Amino acid sequence: MSPILRSPMVSRPPHLWAKAVEKAYMKGEHKVPVLRGVDISVGRGEFLSIVGQSGSGKSTLMHLLGLLDQPDQGEVWLDGNRIDQLPVATRDELRNNVFGFVFQFYHLLPELNLLENVLSPLMIRYSMLEYWRKKRELQERGKEIIEKVGLSHRLRHRPSELSGGEMQRAAIARALAAQPTVLLADEPTGNLDSRTGGEIMSVLHKLNETESLTIIMVTHDDVIASQAERIVRLSEGRIQSLEEAAA
Amino acid sequence: MYKFLLACRYLRTRFIALASIISVTLGVATMIVVNSVMSGFSSQMRERIHATLGDVMVEATSMDGTTDPVELLESVERLAGNYIEAVTPTVEIYGMMSFRWMGQDIYRLVTLVGIVPDTKNKVSPLAQYLLSRQRIVEDNVVIREPLRDINDPLDWSMTEEARQARIDWVKSQQLEDLERRYRNAEASFAALPVNTAAGQSSANAPHPDGQGVQLVGANGSSQEETLEFEDPFGSSSAIEQAPLNPEDPQPAKIFVGAGLVSFPYKDRETNKTRTMYMASPGQDVVLTTIKAGQPQPAAFRATIVDVFKSGMSEYDSNLVFCNLEELQYVRGMLSGPDPTNPHKDLNWKDGAITTLQIKLKNFDDAPEVVRRLSQGLGGYKYQVRTWEQKQGPLLEAVAVESAILNVLLFLIITVAGFGILAIFYMIVVEKTRDIGILKALGASSQGIMTIFLSYGLSLGIVGSGAGVALGLLFVHYINEIEDFISTVTGHKVFDESIYYFHKIPTAVHPMMVFWVALGAIVIAVLASVLPARRAAAMHPVRALRYE
């Protein structure tokens, strides 16, 4: 695959590392800075949460880390390789292979049923021919993951037929289907009641523990954030504090 | 993989897009129907033009024709004999036809064509268009079975019905003549004193009682009595008198175009268009044409032997086929060996002809034959043309018409294309967030573009496929549809008496269907390019934030 994963790790550098990233958006004619130089790093298998008020830049930081966007200044490194300046196609490939995304509003594709939604990153990864050849194997994997999030009974249901919690679990299953090393979760519980949110959190914890999946979670809820190993607090585009959360 | 799955799912779930494709479907269907009917009409028309003409025409540039047909025939045989299946000599000349109907004289401008039936039928199958060999059908009811077999050799013999009609007609004609003579006699008596003896009172002049004369006619007195009355001035007609036995046909016999002796009219009771015949086989008409070599009129009586209806109104209301020898004789192009009985033993080979109609073994050889003949026959004496060249303007007009129609109809499909574009734009906006998700999951811009392009493609395929199916079904059941519409509206959509077809002619060319379908698909894809590019260019973060 890409040269990124080939590099030997000598002094165990951080898994994913943002170095002095800055980002501003144009609002009309005015340039609105969102991130004003943020350094952040996460080790392999770590559960990090980023908290902050709305507009503090936490979502933008997550987008930069997940290569959904490019920083104006600064660098993003993955396993000792700079990734923010790679060609578009390589970044698309990295998003598909390394990162898994979970969004506040689940963002499932309404035209596809649960299994198809979960398999969609794999459909994107493989060409039609390859996909058909591996269809059985991939579907097995998809079903396995769906079982892990406890939705086996909903395999052929459309997202519109699922509850909020079920949709979020489906979104997590989709993120996992690509077998990523980093899971980026943007307010995964933001749209759920506390009990369902708790369920989602326990799923994430389980994944972090059993599969040593690196998780970066963005939230504005301190209670949720405190369940992570480490908390990065953002305010007005800068890091306010770093805390060790006792999980 | 996801691209086609999604394109497929969008196709199944976005009914608004299917609505947009209906316009493509209808456009394609219309194009197929219109093209099929037009090419059906034009091939029928070609067939009919072709049937009255030969494949290749050798026309003398002079209206008087060539005096040595035998030599001409030999040269043609020598020059292109290998390609030729049959040759027939003709004389073509303008003329006027007149006949009496309902007490008034009807005049028609005609083209007189002298033919030799036997060889003419080999060159172009005229026999099948003669009404006596056809079944007459009106409103799907057989009115009359064919009077003789369609494959009977073509000659100038009359059917039994025509012979019977002639006897009746001669009788009524004699009666009418008689009545006219009485009236003429009365009129001339009345006029006499005024003309000859001016100043005298006309009241003194003796004249037969007008009422009495009419009574004689009306009472239907015996023929002997009527023959006693002679026109005092005599008819100084140049027309040769009828043969001794009035029930025998005239020496000149004709096939007359249906349009010349009939007219369509609307039946008040049934509100249907019917055809009224003013003259029928067995009757005589007077034909006036021009003598060859000198500008003198030549008039002669001819008996209608049959009526022909080729379906080309241009021919049916213009052509009169006459026996060649008589036409040659009347025009002074030929004289018989026996001066006492000039009509006996006429042979067209001794006279002059104006045109040779040639049927080829294979029409593809026509250009070669035309080349050989026009070179070999030499000079300005003859003009050699194929039937297509002779009818060039008409055929070209049809071709131009159908080309323009195609352009217009294709514009309709293009309009449908803009409909697709608008709806696609809408769908892309609606799908903004999904596009963001797909990009977050690692889909490339090209991949997103492919989704919408293949969506457009599949819409095009579905739309034009449905259009092709609809169009072909329509063409297949066009007559049933026409019947149905006629019944529902109570108005005849396709009037047989106008077009001479019992059914709407159609001809489906597979290549035409293919190009129409392909054109529609291409337009659908082109219309989706712009929205697809827009979708591909979307920034994932902005797309995800889109509410």
Image (cartoon, coloured by chain):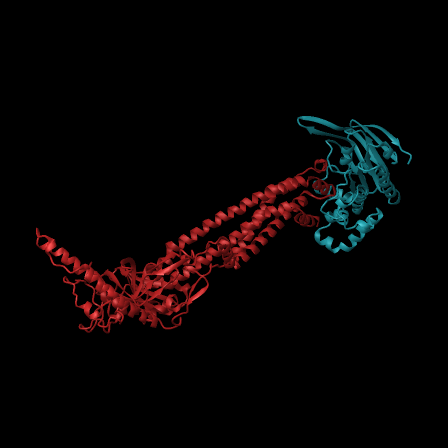
Chain colours: A cyan, B red
Name the quadrant containing residue A5: top right
Instruction: Describe residue B188's horizontal placement relative to residue B385 as left or right.
Output: left
The extreme top residue here reads: A30
Q: Which residue occupies the foreground of this view, A184 or B420?
A: B420
The extreme right residue here reads: A246
- Residue B490, x across and y down, in percent: 48, 54
Q: Is residue B194 visible?
A: no
Q: Which residue occupies the foreground of this view, B326 or A47?
A: B326
Residue sitting at x 33%, y 69%: B162
- Residue A213, x across and y down, in percent: 85, 42
Q: Which residue occupies the foreground of this view, A52 or B285?
A: B285
Instruction: Describe residue A108's horizontal placement relative to residue B285 as left or right.
Output: right
Name the quadrant containing residue B305: bottom left
- Residue B377, x across and y down, in percent: 30, 64
Q: Is residue B74 above or below residue B193?
A: below
Residue sitting at x 64%, y 48%: B454
Question: How many discs mark residues in the rendered view?
Answer: 0
Residue sitting at x 70%, y 26%: A31
Instruction: Describe residue B535's horizontal placement relative to residue B280 as left or right.
Output: right
Instruction: Describe residue B209's horizontal placement relative to residue B156 as left or right.
Output: left
Q: Is residue A188 above or below residue B238?
A: above
In the rendered image, which quarter contains the C terminus of chain B?
top right
- Residue B206, x across and y down, in percent: 12, 59
Name the quadrant containing residue B106: bottom left
Q: Is residue B100 visible?
A: yes
